[in-house]
Image (cartoon, rainbow, N blue to C red):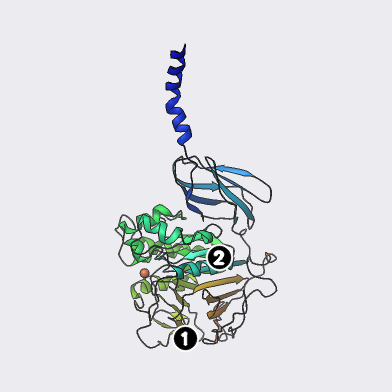
Amino acid sequence: MAHMRIGWLLALLPWLVRAQAAPVPSLIREPYLQKVEPTQALVAFRLSTDCVAQVDYGVGDEHRLATSRDSGRIHAVSLTGLAPGTSYRYAIRACGLQSADHALRTAPAPGSRSAHFVAVGDLGTGGGDQRAIAERMRTRQPELFLALGDLAYASGTEAEFQAHFFQPLAPLLSEVPLFTAPGNHEYVTNEAQPYLDNLYLPSGNPQGTERYYAFDWGPVHFVALDSNCALGMASPAHCTAAAQRAWAETDLTASRLPWKVVFFHHPPWSSGTHGSQVTVRRQFGPIFERAGVDLVLSGHDHDYERTRPMRGDVEARPGERGIPYLVVGGGGADLRRFPGATPTWSARRDDTRHAFLEVVVQEGTLTAWAMTPTGEMLDGFVLNKPLPPGPAPSGPTRGVLPSHPIPRRGFQETQGPEGLPAHQRLSTRPGECDGPSPPWP
Ligand SMILES: [Fe+2]
């Protein structure tokens, strides 16, 4: 009899050892929000051990569960049936792990007339300047974050994405939806394959690639381009300049939203160390002009710079529609001094402070400013356009205090030339924006 009991115990031993040894997984990558739309969102994260994970989410005390399709360590859990413009609490549940609660907010309903976003590039260092920029962006409570490339120095490897992007940006990425464009440093490793492996981005183009894409957020149509592809750095199997250009023209022209913002890494206009990427400008500038693009954001040079309204290879003449091109490359990498004098087309530039761009769109007014980690404002400008009457405004934009929605100090609104077509009353008084004490938090 004793012999039989010992036999049973021996048979159970492997199971008992496994059960005792099975550790509760930890989050080796905190959750980050991807493909956030009005009624759905993706919560991505990584675990230390294999597990079929779940996301517990809801409004207030509500608890809904969404289950991952994966049973390993890499997860991207889709939340569906969400309400537009609504804040949800969410947490990760995985084999005994129960994460802290986080918050996400869905994109506004189509037809809404406000948006609030931040943008910066050249951030992937894992250093203190990057963290300071990210923390300041987080405190502004934007609805979405555009990352303008060079996210993971030096080579965009899997390990560098973890150490130089996801880890330092975790507090921001757990609550602000992320949209990115690839930089040249991402292309160092297998033409940005780790970038594609780590991020979940819209595609929706005929090539089915996530290297370039478009999405709508309230009144803004956003387009992310792969400027590496435009510069011939991608193999044809991954991306061709012609296909991207054709898609961009079709997409930008088709959108009927009142505001169009395009972002990518290499700047068409820059007086920084890399300088203007004329190839990119010549490929896309005419498309942007035909499609009525309002604002173009890039990085690559480690500084801040805004052009006057440009058209073709020159400044727009009075009465002509022009596009302001911005370099927002002060996301954390070491700043680089401008090599020469300020060109006439450069409206405002700064190579002494890290800064990100914050943009509020409200009806027919787009207001933008460049902010340092300590809250100083390097620049500010306003674009105005008449909009046809629409539904009632959708309420105050998230994160901007209704009592003083937009920092006005340093801004000067001027009227554009008579007859300026439905766009572009670009105004600012450069140089007046630098103040030791910012007028907002
Ligand atoms: Fe770059």
- x, y percent for residue 335: 40, 76
In the picture as drawn, the residue positioned furthest to the front comes out as: 2
Frontmost of labels 2 and 1 is 2
Q: Say which quarter of the image contains residue 235.
A: bottom left
- Work out whether residue 52 or residue 428 is closer to the camera in this orientation and state it: 52
Q: Residues within 10 Å of mark 2 (few under 14, many from 20)?
A: many
User: Does any portion of residue 187 appear in the rendered image?
Assistant: yes
Contact, mark 2 vs mark 1 (Cβ under 8 Å): no
Per the rendering, the mark at residue 317 is 1
Q: Amino acid at mark 2?
A: Arg
Residue 261 seen in render: no
Residue sitting farthest toward the top: 1
Residue 181 placement (x, y as % from top left): 42, 63
Where is residue 60 drawn, in percent x and y?
A: 68, 51
The relative height of residue 207 versus residue 404 in the rendered view (above or below) is above
Q: Which mark is residue 138?
A: 2
Instruction: Say whether disc 2 or disc 1 marks the residue closer to the N-terminus.
Output: 2
Q: Is residue 100 above or below residue 372?
A: above
Q: CA distance from mark 2 to mark 1?
A: 38 Å
Between 56 and 273, the one lying in front of the other is 56
Question: What residue appears at the point 31 percent right and 58 percent down from the top-left corner?
Answer: 189
* Local secondary structure at mark 2: helix
Question: Quadrant location of ligand 1?
Answer: bottom left
435 to the left or right of 86: left
Tell me the kind of residue under disc 1: Arg
